[in-house]
Image: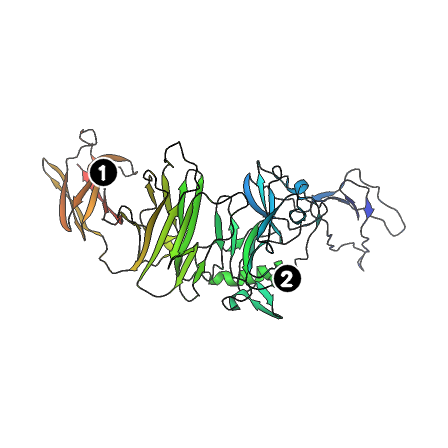
Amino acid sequence: IWFSENGGPFQLWRILEPDASRQVSGRATFIGKFGHEYRFYAVGTDRVGNRQSHPHQPQVTTRVSPPPRISAGLKMVTLPVISEIADPKQVFQFDEDRWAWYDPETRQYARYPAPAASSLQVGKGFWGRFGQEVVPYVRGELPDDSQPFSIRLKGGSWNLIGNPWLVDLPWDTQAIQVQVNGQRKALKDLREGEGVEPYAWRWDGSAYRFVYDQSLIAGLDGRLPAWEGAWVYAHQDCELLLPPVTAMRTSWAHRRQDLRGNGWTMRLVAQIGEESGQALLGVSEGARSVSVGLPPDPPEGSRGVQVILLKKGTPLAVDVRNGSSRREEWEVLVRWTGVQRMNRTDDYGEVVLTFDGVGYAPKDKSVWLVDLSTGKRLYLRTQHSYRFRPERGETERRFKVIAETGNERSLRIVGVKTSPVRGEGIVLEFGLTKEAQVTVEVLTLMGRRVALVEAQKGRSEGTHRVLWRRTNSDGRELTQGRYLIKITATDADGRQVQAMTIASLR
């Protein structure tokens, strides 16, 4: 078997001898270099020395692991290849000199072409600004993925690391270990303030994302993607030991059966235009609480929009509590001082708050957002966003998130039925378990609305009757057939329920 590397001359790679049955068979593994192209062909020789002619074209052509595409924008990246090219500019093709590495000794960014920012190394993370989509130009050896990968960390500082593998790294606190003070421990076994914090921060292109073990807390980013960098915080000088790919796959496949997720989390995101900030809050059941501040700002300046959780006056980005209290409250500060104003006035534009992950909360848990400036209260199970326009001169606003276990009667629509009334139409009867705003619509069986009977009418707890005069929205009488009547009720906290029934016109 002959091979050629990157279009070079063919070289003899392996000779396969026939077995006792005079058959030539077998399996061989060719270990190539990342980014290199290889061509192969085979030539057979019989027992008396007759040889096949060499083919004009290779029988197999392959390239070892083509690199990914990196989209435009500010990215936190890493190179999981022992590169043959030392200059990161040639490899990543970033904009101008917009490339940086964080020095944990000085706690400052070293920027390209400073030597510290110009040294590509597996396990090292970098910031880069890309004006357009790029494909890294990479050739080199791969680290041994059958052994743990060690990354030295500086104590008392944030460290910018990189995923050393060509596959996503599950953030498994049982499989990831730390070598500290001559001992090796799993992240889950570290005492508070020992070694390294058991989480990481990645960058999604516009905001930081918290990375943690999904088997401990549901609804989090549970992986560090391939070719990405991340922040970790070390309390002491130590070594972070990332599991080899084979062990990582085995461990993760085994633990996936247990990913039920203890507790729940909610991601609170504030956005103005294209700028956004976010924080994470929730409750952990059976795991230790997690209270975390944000890592250093990106090298291109501070975040324009910030969502800050205030816990006894301490600003946090993550506040996941371990407790069985019936009621939990989080104080939230949304700040937009770094956002570009729309004009010379104090008009920043509309602020949009969204809430992701409330569905992880137990069914008997009610979750509200309270705007402390206006007193407006939203029920987050059914209201997925909140919008407001800042007042003139306003640069921040405070909110409260309240999670409470079933202490209040829920809103329900009960006893729904219809009755025809000669010469009048159809009477709809229903009951409410509490006061609510009610909307009644008539739909076709395919779901198209044909009539709005009443819209957002305030109704008290109890039984109600509504007359539908068999007409559509234009006042014309509908033809015979079957129609859906849909009732939507919304209480004062924004909780919304629906009920439907069928009415037949004859």
Q: Residue at x 26, y 37 (%)?
A: 444
Helix, strand or loop at label 2? It is loop
Question: Which amino acid does the dot numbered 2 rest on?
Answer: Pro
List the residue tagged with mark 2: 148
Q: Residue at x 37, y 41 (%)?
A: 351
Give the CA distance from mark 1 to mark 2.
Answer: 63 Å
Of labels 1 and 2, the one closer to you: 2
The residue closer to the viewer here, 153 or 320, is 153
Question: Which amino acid does the dot numbered 1 rest on?
Answer: Val
- Coordinates of residue 195 in the picture (x, y in percent): 56, 65
* Above or below 500: residue 177: below
From the viewer's perspective, is 19 left or right of 487? right
Q: Dot 1: few (<14), some (14–19), or many (≥20) neighbours within 10 Å?
A: many
From the viewer's perspective, is 504 left or right of 75? left
Q: Dot 2: few (<14), some (14–19), or many (≥20) neighbours within 10 Å?
A: some
From the viewer's perspective, is 441 left or right of 168? left
The residue closer to the viewer here, 59 or 138, is 138
Mark carried by residue 442: 1
Q: Residue at x 49, y 45 (%)?
A: 302
Quarter of the rendering containing residue 219: bottom left
Residue found at the far left of this picture: 423
- Coordinates of residue 235 in the picture (x, y in percent): 55, 63
Residue found at the far right of this picture: 48
- Coordinates of residue 165 in the picture (x, y in percent): 62, 53
